[in-house]
């Protein structure tokens, strides 16, 4: 795969940077949640970190032959606070992607006829909606000093669709079958 338009390529690099940073930030915040006695919230953060890695890899693959140096700037919450505050930062980041970033990136890719970029932006946008909601649920519990109630967290390895306890028969975003979901 390769991108023909400079704007879409720049958006893919930006999205790659943001998803890569989110991946690492959520892993750090998961360790903090474990230390504070929120092991299930930590599992959620690690599962979403995996989904962010899926998004970053998808963006990277679509860039394909676009080899060379590129400054990648991705705005996001940076730093470590308590778990409830870290989750507030996670929610803000996910909502930014849902409300601002991915809709614009998707429409630019659509305008430029970049179907592979449209697909990867769509996958990320749909998953980020779920991530924001799951982080809201986790934060409500953390504010009360409680951990999440869940058995498992499942992530589609193709698009990052993330669900608690049971995967759907087919991923509603990309169509992947239930048996391919990765359990966290």
Image (cartoon, rainbow, N blue to C red):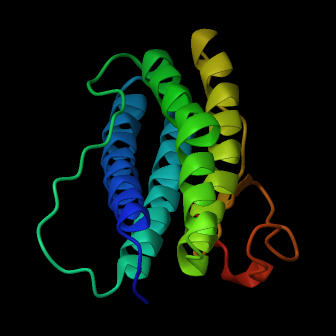
Residue at point 78% right, 83% down?
A: 177
Residue at point 52% right, 60% down?
A: 51
Does 82 appear above or below 116?
above
| Quadrant (top left, top right, bottom left, bottom right) of the C terminus | bottom right
**Along the horizontal axis of the image, is 88 left or right of 18?**
right
Residue 121 at least partly seen:
yes
Residue at point 41% right, 55% down?
A: 15
**Along the horizontal axis of the image, is 42 left or right of 60?**
right
The quadrant in which residue 113 appears is bottom right
Horizontal and vertical percent position of residue 92: 52, 26
**Of residues 148 and 80, which is closer to you in this image?**
80
The quadrant in which residue 119 appears is bottom right
**Residue sitting at the far top:** 144
**Of residues 47 and 6, which is closer to you in this image?**
6
| Quadrant (top left, top right, bottom left, bottom right) of the N terminus | bottom left
**Of residues 105 and 138, which is closer to you in this image?**
105
Horizontal and vertical percent position of residue 70: 16, 61
Tell how many labels: 0
Residue at point 66% right, 32% down?
A: 148
Residue 160 at least partly seen:
no
Does 44 appear above or below 13?
above
**Residue sitting at the far right:** 169
């Amino acid at each position: 795969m390769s991108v023909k338009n400079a704007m879409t390529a720049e958006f893919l690099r930006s999205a790659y940077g943001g998803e890569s940073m989110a991946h690492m930030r959520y892993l750090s915040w998961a360790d903090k949640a474990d230390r504070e006695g929120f092991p299930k919230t930590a599992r959620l953060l690690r599962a979403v970190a995996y989904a962010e890695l899926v998004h970053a890899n998808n963006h990277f693959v679509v860039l394909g032959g676009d080899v060379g140096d590129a400054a990648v700037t991705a705005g996001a919450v940076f730093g470590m606070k308590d778990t409830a505050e870290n989750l507030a930062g996670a929610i803000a980041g996910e909502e930014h992607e849902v409300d601002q970033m991915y809709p614009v990136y998707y429409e630019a890719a659509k305008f430029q006829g970049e179907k592979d970029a449209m697909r990867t932006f769509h996958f990320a946008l749909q998953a980020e909606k779920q991530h924001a909601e799951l982080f809201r649920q986790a934060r409500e519990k953390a504010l009360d000093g409680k951990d999440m109630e869940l058995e498992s967290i499942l992530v589609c390895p193709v698009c990052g669709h993330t669900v608690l306890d049971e995967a759907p028969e087919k991923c509603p975003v990309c169509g992947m079958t239930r048996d391919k979901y990765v359990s966290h």
